[in-house]
Image (tube, rainbow, N blue to C red):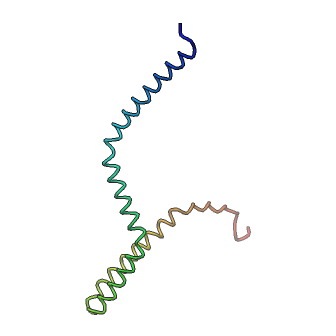
């Protein structure tokens, strides 16, 4: 006959073995996802880096445009038109996003006739 202490010890040993088996199974399943997840993480890192350096990129583009305007004044007009069009599109998109994020205003209640009838 087994004592309660031995029964608990045997159950504990089975649970430890089961946990080890489940860990091994999970490790095998996640190993298949490791490369795609690493690729996604790199992509997110590039995105975060670009997002952080946008002011620097903008400044660099501005300096390049100024240098181009200084070197070839007649050739810059097309660039300026293109840049202003891109700026307008970006501004419109930001404005549209801001409008979409705003909660809708509740409809105003109808309060009888304004003419006083």
Coordinates of residue 67 in the picture (x, y in percent): 31, 88
For this rendering, which residue is in front, 1 or 82? 1
Residue name at image x 39 percent, y 80 percent: 59
Q: Is residue 4 above or below residue 85?
A: above
Coordinates of residue 13 in the picture (x, y in percent): 47, 22
Where, by quadrant of the figure, is residue 46 drawn?
A: bottom left
For this rendering, which residue is in front, 85 or 48? 48
Q: Is residue 21 above or below residue 67?
A: above
Q: Is residue 111 above or below residue 18?
A: below
Residue name at image x 38 percent, y 60 percent: 45
Residue name at image x 32 percent, y 84 percent: 64
For this rendering, which residue is in front, 81 or 37? 37
Where, by quadrant of the figure, is residue 41 drawn?
A: bottom left
Relative placement, left or right, of 112 versus 31 is right
Relative placement, left or right, of 112 versus 80 is right
Relative placement, left or right, of 84 versus 108 is left
Coordinates of residue 91 in the picture (x, y in percent): 44, 74
- Look at the image and tell me in which quarter the C terminus lies: bottom right
Q: How many marks?
A: 0
Residue name at image x 39 percent, y 73 percent: 89
Determine the residue located farthest toward the top in the rendered image: 1
């Amino acid at each position: 006959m087994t004592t309660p202490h031995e029964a608990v010890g045997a159950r504990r040993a089975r649970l430890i073995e089961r946990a080890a088996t489940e860990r091994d199974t999970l490790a095998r399943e996640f190993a298949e996802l490791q490369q795609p997840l690493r690729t996604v993480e790199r992509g997110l890192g590039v995105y975060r880096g670009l997002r952080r350096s946008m002011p620097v990129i903008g400044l660099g583009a501005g300096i390049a445009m100024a240098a181009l305007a200084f070197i070839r004044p007649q050739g810059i007009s097309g660039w300026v038109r293109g840049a202003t069009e891109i700026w307008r599109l970006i501004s419109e998109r930001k404005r549209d996003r801001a409008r979409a994020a705003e909660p809708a205003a509740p409809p105003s209640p109808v309060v009888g006739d304004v003419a006083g009838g």
